[in-house]
Amino acid sequence: MPSLTNIMQWLESNNNVAYSLIRIFLGVALFVRGVIMISDPMLITNLTGANQYYWWYSYVMIAHIAGGLFMALGIFARLGAFVQIPILTGAVLLVHFKEGLLSVGQSLELSVLVLVLLVIYFVFGPGPLSVDNVIARKKSIGKEVQNNF
């Protein structure tokens, strides 16, 4: 049985796995949020207080579902994060900012957290446990083989 020291050493040397696990969780959470919005369209209307922007609601639902799935799988993860940044920016500035930090629902800080994470994954990429990373490694190996000939 591995000792606590061995487990801690493994965790320290593989902390990049945590980065990928956060991306997977964030992607699944956003995907689920999109599914919830499709199953209850009044939810987004209640959040925003307006119902004249149906095209925007469609974008939000599709971006959460597709972008969340992309992020969870780590394929086109930067694109998945990018399409959701305007949504979370709008949620922070237009919906939750007026509630403030001391609201019972804690929506502002959660929306800011999700926005910051989306920006991080857009800028830094999906991490090692991703389809994007596997594809990049295969391309790199292919180029290396070609250069050796």
Image (cartoon, rainbow, N blue to C red):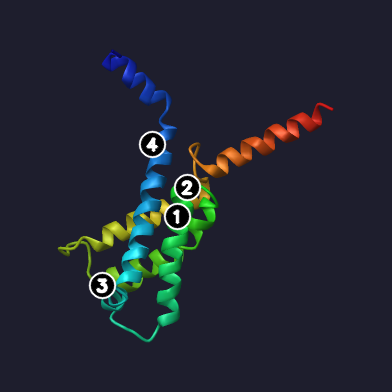
Mark number, residue 122: none
Question: Residue at image x 74%, y 30%?
Answer: 144
Q: Which residue is mark 3?
A: 98
Pointer 3 or 4: first along the chain: 4
Circle 3 residues within 10 Å: few <14, some 14–19, many ≥20: few
The secondary element bearing badge 2 is classed as helix
Q: Going from the N terminus, do you reach mark 4 or mark 1 first? A: 4
Q: Position of residue 115 (x, y in %)?
A: 39, 58
Residue assigned mark 4 = 18
Mark 1 lies on a secondary structure that is helix
Which residue was labeled with disc 2?
73
- C-alpha span from label 4 to label 1: 18 Å
Q: Nearer the viewer, mark 3 or mark 4?
A: 4
Sequence order check: which comes first, mark 2 or mark 3? Answer: 2
Q: For numbered disc 3, what is the local secondary structure?
A: loop
Q: Out of 107 and 134, give the one closest to the viewer.
A: 134
Amino acid, disc 1? Leu
* Label 2 – label 1 distance at C-alpha: 6 Å
- Say the numbered circle drawn on residue 69: 1
Q: How far is disc 3 from disc 4 in space, using C-alphas?
A: 33 Å
In the picture, the quarter occupied by the N terminus is top left
